[in-house]
Structures are given as C-alpha cells and as structure tokens.
Image (cartoon, rainbow, N blue to C red):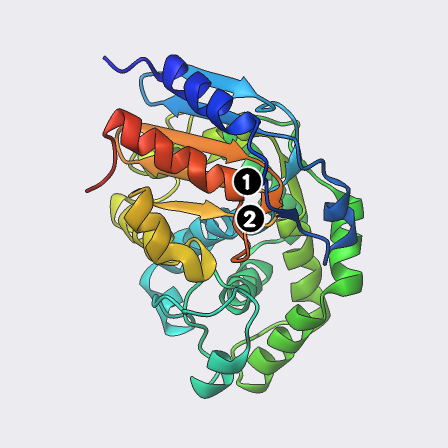
Amino acid sequence: MTDFQNVINTIYNNLKSATDKGVVADYIPELAKQKKESFGIYLKHLNGNSYHVGDWDKPFSIQSISKVLALSKAIAFEDKKIWERVDVEPSGDPFNHLSLLEHENGIPRNPLINAGAIVVADILVSRLNNPKQDFLNYVRDISGDQTINYNLKVAKSEKLTGYNNYAAANLLKAYNNLNNDVEVVLDFYFHQCALEMNCSQIANAFYMFSNRGKCINNVAHITLSQVKRINAIMLTCGFYDEAGEFAFEVGLPGKSGVGGGIVALLPDDFVIVTWSPGLNPKGNSLIGMQALEQFTTKTNRSIF
C-alpha cells in the first residue's frame, strides 16, 4: 500500500525551497497579484481517502482547467456532434494562437485551446437557460460544494485584456462556427475561466473523470465513452504545446491553467492537484510539473 501522505510530504519539502519558481502570469492583471511562494498538493483517492500538504485549501483562479469542465457539460448535450465543430488534434502552438484557426477554416484544433474552448462556450450558451449560473451550479454539483463561485474581479480583468480571445471569437464567427453573439459568448467564457477553487475542490470536480463519469456523489453525468474521450484529449492537449512533455515525464491525463493549477488523474485510482503560481515559458506551473513528475516516479503510477 502506497503511503501517499509521505510521498507528497517529501515532494513538497523537496520543491518548497526551490530557487526557480517560474514567473507569475501578468497579462491578466488580477493574476499578477498571486504570491509565487504559494504551493499546495492535494490527492483524492477513489477509496475515499484524501491527502494534502501546503496551500491546498487556498482558492485561486482555475483558468484553463475550467475548459475540461465546460467540455464535459457540452459533450453531455452534444455527444459526437461536438466533433463537427472542434477537432481533437494537439495544436503544437500556444493556447491563444490564431494562425491554425484560419488555415483550417474555423475549426479549432482541440477544445482545450482558447478557440476550441470558445466554441464549447458557444454550445453552452445555446443549451443552458441561464448559462453563467447554470454552469456554476453544474460545477458545484459535481464537486459536492455549493461555496464555489466566480471571481468577478478576474472576469472583469480578463474582459478588459482579452484581445486575443475577441480576435478568435470574431474569426470563429466569420467562419460560421459561432452561433451566438460574440460579446455574449465571451462574457460566459471569461466567467468560466474566472472560477475560483482550491486544490481539494478541483480534485472533487475531476473525480468523475477517474470514476467512469460518476461524480463525488456517485451521480452519472457523462458516459464511459465520453470519459474516455475527454481523458484522451487531456493527455494529448491538456498542456498547450508541452502536452508531449507532460505525457513523457508524468504519464497521466491532466490539465493546467495559467493561475498555476494542474490537475491530473489515473482512471479508477486517484485525482491529484498541485498549485504553484509561477509558470514556465510554456505557461504551465514550473513547480507543479516537477511535483507531478516526482509523484508518478515515486509511486510507479501512470497510465503507461
């Protein structure tokens, strides 16, 4: 039996004093206020046990981690039809690049880059009666936590600086791959990315991707086939243009966000979340990536 608490304590102590902790994202001004020294790890096992160390209970902006949750809600509505509007290929480009979108006639490479996530947001705006509140309720339900909320300051900060996202949304609209008004879709998208959660809340939200589509309350939200596809996309596309490196070093499906969070999981086993706001040049948490590589090395747990 693996002593998970001892493993994450060791990793935490190894990395807490690292001299290079990366660079905190500042292109969204509200994110620049995070302390680079923050670092937490939380592991949720499917047997019900949880293990944690450091700043695991401090809320932060989950940013692109939210794209997986939005995708899971959209795929429950659309199933295979969703792939007519967004592809499943790694982009090989940063998350906010637009060149491929024009080259491929308005079909984003995958749902985890910004353009793809904006298409997913468009689906949810079409499908939900009160999109922002309904999506928030969904995240609260799958997490078993009614305290989760949007950080409205972050959402406003994103809107004021989201020129690339406006460009992507308008390009999607020009290619007839956006059904709703650009402003409406982006308002939803900026709020989605501004979800504020701590490591344990994220682990609980992602529990269903490790538990065959059943959330922390054992309610089925998506099918096993849909879980399989979402986990595959996380493995191949979850880390911008560093997804291959993450698969190589860590070997788990996962998703990062520029708020410094990373979630990863092993189906039928566990979900693990790290948070350290300093990013590497690819936009992923520098310490978080190292922590997860050490975790799968020490525990011999990966999908490979």
Q: Are marks 2 and 1 in contact (CB under 8 Å)?
A: yes
Counting from the top left corner in percent of width and height, residue 149 is at: 68, 36
Residue at figure coordinates x 62%, y 27% from the top left: 146
Left or right of 178 on screen, residue 83: left
* Number of numbered labels in the structure image: 2
10 Å crowding of disc 2: few (<14), some (14-19), many (20+): many
Q: Position of residue 200 (x, y in %)?
A: 52, 26
Instruction: Tell which of 97 and 88 is nearer to you.
Output: 97
Quadrant where the C terminus is found in the figure: top left
Which residue lies under the disc numbered 2?
257
Q: Which amino acid type is shown beneath numbered disc 1?
A: Gly
- 126 horizontally vs 225: left or right: right
Dot 1: element: strand
Residue at the limit of the structure toward the left, as seen here: 304
Judge whether residue 181 can be spotted in this image.
no
Helix or strand or loop: what does disc 2 sit on? Answer: loop
Residue at 52 percent across and 62 percent down: it is 117
Residue placed at 43% from the left, 38% from the top? Answer: 290
Q: Position of residue 223 (x, y in %)?
A: 30, 45
Nearest the viewer among 74 and 37 is 37
45 left or right of 157 in image: left
Identify the residue at horizontal 51%, vertical 30% (top origin): 143
In the image as oriented, which residue stretches furthest toward the front?
19
* Numbered badge on residue 261: 1
Look at the picture and state if 111 lies above or below 180. Answer: above
